[in-house]
Amino acid sequence: MKKARQFARAALFLFSWGVLFSAFVSQEVHRDVPYVPSPPEVVEEMLRLAQLKPGDILYDLGCGDGRIVVTAAQKAGIKAIGIDIDPQRIEESWQNARAAGVTNLVEFRQGDLFTADIHDASVVTLYLLTYVNLKLRPKLLSELKPGTRLVSHNYAMDTWKPDQTTTVVVDDSVHTVYFWVVPANLTGIWQWSMPLNQKKLDCRLEVDQHFQWFQGKLTVGRDTVVIQETKLEGPKVNFQAVLTDRNQRIVLDFSGQAQGDQITGTVTVKSNNGEEKIPWKATRDPKSKKPLDTGESTW
């Protein structure tokens, strides 16, 4: 009878530790998505859309067995980093890197995608789920440099519409590949001065933006107009404004690069007097800046 009680206590002890260990493991490795590797054909298309070039740094978020990272290092000779929460996937990734002979170019990190440091990426690849992409979206827009390229297999970003979409057919299964360029944040109020018709005029630009699309009102001196022909590609900013001065039509073509709270570039002034290029340097009131990830589009 005594031995039976001892056996029962031992069994209960082992069961309790088993429950605690299972809870610990499930807490340590919480997978937001199931592991499903991208077919090689899809990997090739993702990297083609990413337009890899020397000096790029690629991050694959949810890297699985590391196939995108290894292929990028093999094909383009660039630095590539994979992040996954599952230690088994990280070990598989290192094995694949060693087999491919690219361990000098790649790195694999076990960690949480939402807290990982990715600020130095010039390319980010994803094969997650839509809801995970949406959880990542604010991080991608706020931490990545304007001009960073994003590529996602099968899952989009809701109201952040892709710049390009392609499909790949593999064994009668259709795979969609989405491509974005991270835009500069132009939201807010920008100010500068410039010479026009032998006068130095104060200018003010108020910008509303939804991801890579923007619109705004430009005030030059006392005249206010809606800007036209707006285009934003990463940090590259272009727009046009048309003014009327003494029955003369003046077209202002703005072209510049945004960096933080400054835009630097040129303004091409077209009028009856011909065409002239003048320097353009605008400064934003930092308090007027708003996040790009604003939820539903009003456009």
Image (cartoon, rainbow, N blue to C red):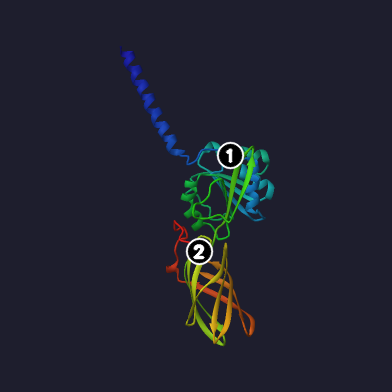
189 versus 139 height, above or below? below
Residue 104 shows up from this direction = no
Q: Secondary structure at mark 2?
A: loop
Q: Is residue 179 visible?
A: yes
Give the quarter of the image for residue 38: top right
In the image, what residue type sits under mark 2? Asn
Q: Is residue 11 above or below residue 23?
A: above
| SS of the residue under disc 1 | loop
Label 1 sits on residue: 37
The answer to whether residue 236 is above or below residue 55 is: below
Q: Between residue 32 and residue 165, name the one nearer to us.
A: 165
> Toward the viewer: 166 or 38?
166
Q: Determine the residue located farthest toward the top in the rendered image.
A: 1
Quote the CA–CA distance across marks 2 and 1: 34 Å
Q: Amino acid at mark 1?
A: Pro
Q: Nearer the viewer, residue 154 or 80?
A: 154
Quarter occupied by residue 14: top left
Where is residue 50? Give x, y as percent. 62, 52
x and y, in percent, of residue 231 in the image: 57, 66
Dot label at residue 123: none
Give the quarter of the image for residue 172.
top right
Does residue 271 appear left or right of residue 200 in this picture?
A: right
Horizontal relation, residue 103 to residue 213: left or right: right
> Relative to the observer, which residue lies in front, 37 or 173?
173
Q: Residue at the spot x=52%, y=44% of the render? A: 128
Q: Which residue is mark 2?
A: 185
x%, y% of residue 10?
36, 21
The quarter in which the N terminus is drawn is top left
Decide: is 74 above or below 287. Answer: above
- CB under 8 Å between discs 2 and 1: no
